[in-house]
Image (cartoon, helix red, strand yellow):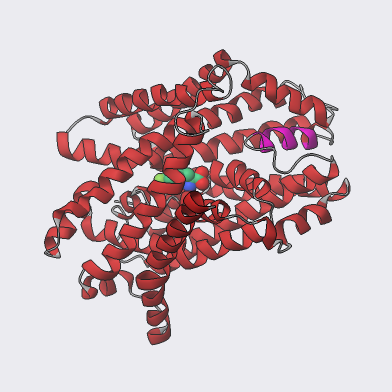
Amino acid sequence: MWSSRTLFILAAVGSAVGLGNIWRFPYITGENGGGAFVVVYLLCIAAVGIPVMMAEVLLGRQGRQSPINTMRSLAQQSEAWRGWSLIGWMGALGGFLILSYYSVVAGWALYYIYLLASGTFVGTEAAAAGAAFDAFLANPGLLVGFHTLFMVITVFIVGAGVVAGLERAIRWFMPLLFVLLGVLLVYGATSGGFAAGFNFMFSWNWEKLTADGVLEALGHAFFTLSVGMGAIMAYGSYMPNKASIPSAVVMIGVLDTLVAIAAGLAIFAIVFANGLEPGQGPGLLFVTVPIAFGNMGLGVLFGTLFFILVTFAAITSAISIIEPAMAFAVEEFKARRWHVALVLGLVCWILGLGTVFSFNAWADVHVVGEMTFFDFFDFVTQKVMLPLGGLLIAVFAAWVLPKAVVKAQLRLPGGRPVEVLWEVLIKVAAPVGVLAVFVYTLYHFFFQ
Ligand code: PFF
């Protein structure tokens, strides 16, 4: 069990803050035209993500086992269908798929530590930074190498069980990350892109928002909070009973959102200061940030540190992504952590090759429709599994688990009004919201 409430928060922040905030949020915001997309995303965090996260933590703490067995035993205790353990199975499977591409992108960050440290980008022009990234993506050998390195680091940390020490390091990491995002923001502001970036993120251009964009915002809200696949449930199972779930979850949600917004503002300031394309896709972080650090004093130092921080953020998230499968294997087969970590790592590594080749050799291989392996893994996890998992978790906590259990776990502060708000969010807003977005997207897919 976590030794204290603080350690739970640190671990959960470590899980939540990751590539989702720094890499994914800015690039999907760019692809979806900014403004309205950000508003929908914030709404999804507040009305769906945070309540479902509370539900997930409370289920975990009530069940105190791996997500699969937690769901099974809670369903039994509630005299409900045992098939609710499917939430746990889907989460464990989702973890494999997510980690497979997460590791590839984390490998990009690892490589960029080297590029920045070696001064590659000193005085760089926008075009050269873009060309460097394209050349990197076109080199499957390098991509595989850094994907492998990241996976080895993750397997080592998970296998050796040195996770708690890492969690404590989050104390240092968060302020440092904000400082470096601040440095980027100052650069963006002095080179004249801040206002344009700010407008891009916060002006309400509804006409740019598509049905797919709404689903993207919802799926990303789950992804960035690590909710919908049992990761936070697994962490909740280690949380001490006396710690307050609502205050911890709100804090995690706010911190996670602040990091994403800060990263977005910094990156779009650079985008507009240099006349770059906001919707250029997954390379956005790796093209903009080197331009900024390449053209400021102490840029080599700051830039190297920045990508070290991104990698660290990715590691603390990666650990939580395989925790549901890890916890289940250790509990069910009494297997050793080392063995499980190696097997899980190997499976994710192999799956990750699909993502590696999506950017070069297999760029024209389409799994479904127009989707490459990377697109497909991304689609199935963010847009299907996480929202579906979140929906089922909300329904289970709201309608299946005895009310007294929920009440005793949550101990909501603020009396009746807060209780009503919780009920409305978890019983109606979260499930109906997810369902509505699913139906709306399917309708557009088939009829428009
Ligand atoms: N929340 C992490 C991020 O934003 O990078 C990613 C993640 C972690 C997703 C854990 C899912 C998960 F279970």
415 lies left or right of 31: left
Depth check, front residue: 362 or 118: 362
Residue 369 magenta: no
Q: Is residue 168 visible?
A: no
- Please say if 284 is above or below 426: above
Q: Can residue 99 be seen in this view?
A: yes
Q: Which residue is pictured at 56% across the width and 20% down the height?
A: 143
Depth check, front residue: 388 or 46: 388
Q: What stretch is highlighted in magenta?
A: 283-292
Depth check, front residue: 302 or 321: 321
Depth check, front residue: 160 or 60: 60
**Residue 6 image position (x, y, % from top left):** 43, 57
Residue 289 magenta: yes
Corner quadrant of residue 346: top left
Magenta part, dominant SS: helix
341 lies left or right of 309: left
Q: Which residue is pictured at 19% across the width and 31% down the height?
A: 335
Corner quadrant of residue 435: bottom left
Corner quadrant of residue 312: top right
**Residue 297 image position (x, y, % from top left):** 84, 35
Q: Which residue is pictured at 47% across the width and 20% down the height?
A: 148
**Residue 214 image position (x, y, % from top left):** 55, 56
416 lies left or right of 70: right
